[in-house]
């Protein structure tokens, strides 16, 4: 049996968000990524729908740098490995609502959802130059 996730360099234009981003976070985050010269925190996305589950700000920071791809853990979103809850209030949230918000273009406010996995993901680092080419 294969794991319910895989690592991939995902075309950035394929991704769809379910949360808005805070503009004030993007400049400092982009500067931090440029200074490091590597992208060491892959985002999480739902396989097939390409909905961003974790990493909206990192996606937007890379998009503004002109990145063509982004490192991602691609999950079978129906798997029991990944869970979603309300960020501020705790408690469960429906995965279907996350997907619906991405599909209909009515995203949640920033930091509304919190996705967690019950496995340890391996470390993956990709040179920034590989993403901008």
Image (spheres, rainbow, N blue to C red):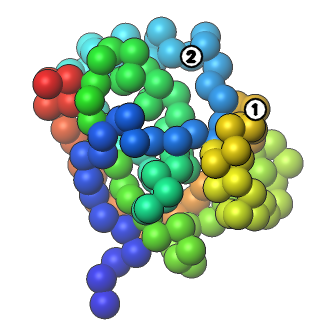
Q: Would you place residue 76 above or below residue 14 in this image?
A: below
Indicate left or right for 100 with 89 as reference: left
Q: Determine if residue 79 is in view.
A: yes
- Residue nearest the observer in this picture, 81 or 8: 8
Q: x and y percent of residue 81 in the render?
A: 52, 73
Question: Which SS class for mark 1?
Answer: loop
Residue at 68%, 63% in the rendered image: 95
Question: How many labels, in total?
Answer: 2
Quarter of the image with the N terminus in it: bottom left
What residue is shown at x 38% (from left), y 59% (from top)?
74
Tell me which label, 1 or 2, sits earlier in the chain: 2
Task: Please identify the quadrant where the C terminus is shown.
Answer: top left
Question: In the rendered image, which residue does mark 1 sit on?
Answer: 109
Q: Quadrant of residue 96?
A: bottom right
Task: Please give left or right for residue 73 compared with residue 78 in the image.
Answer: left
Give me the residue at 44% from left, 62% from top: 48
Q: Secondary structure at mark 2?
A: helix
Residue 45 drawn at (x, y percent): 46, 53
Question: How far apart are labels 1 and 2 at the CA level?
Answer: 14 Å
From the image, tell me which residue sits under label 2: 25
- Residue positioned 28% across, 24% down in the render: 67
- Are the residues tagged 1 and 2 within 8 Å (C-beta)? no
Task: Say the numbered circle drawn on residue 70.
Answer: none
Q: Is residue 118 visible?
A: no
The answer to which image quadrant residue 30 occupies is top left
């Amino acid at each position: 049996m294969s794991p319910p996730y895989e690592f991939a360099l995902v075309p950035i234009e394929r991704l769809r968000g379910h949360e808005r981003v805070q503009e004030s976070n993007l400049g400092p985050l982009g500067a931090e990524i440029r200074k490091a010269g590597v992208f060491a925190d892959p985002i999480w996305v739902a396989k097939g729908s390409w909905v961003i589950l974790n990493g909206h700000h990192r996606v937007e920071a890379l998009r503004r740098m002109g990145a063509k791809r982004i490192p991602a853990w691609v999950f079978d979103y129906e798997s029991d490995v990944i869970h979603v809850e309300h960020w501020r209030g705790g408690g469960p949230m429906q995965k279907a609502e996350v997907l619906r918000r991405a599909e209909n273009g009515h995203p949640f406010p920033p930091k509304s959802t919190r996705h967690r996995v019950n496995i340890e993901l391996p470390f993956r680092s990709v040179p920034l130059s590989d993403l901008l080419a």
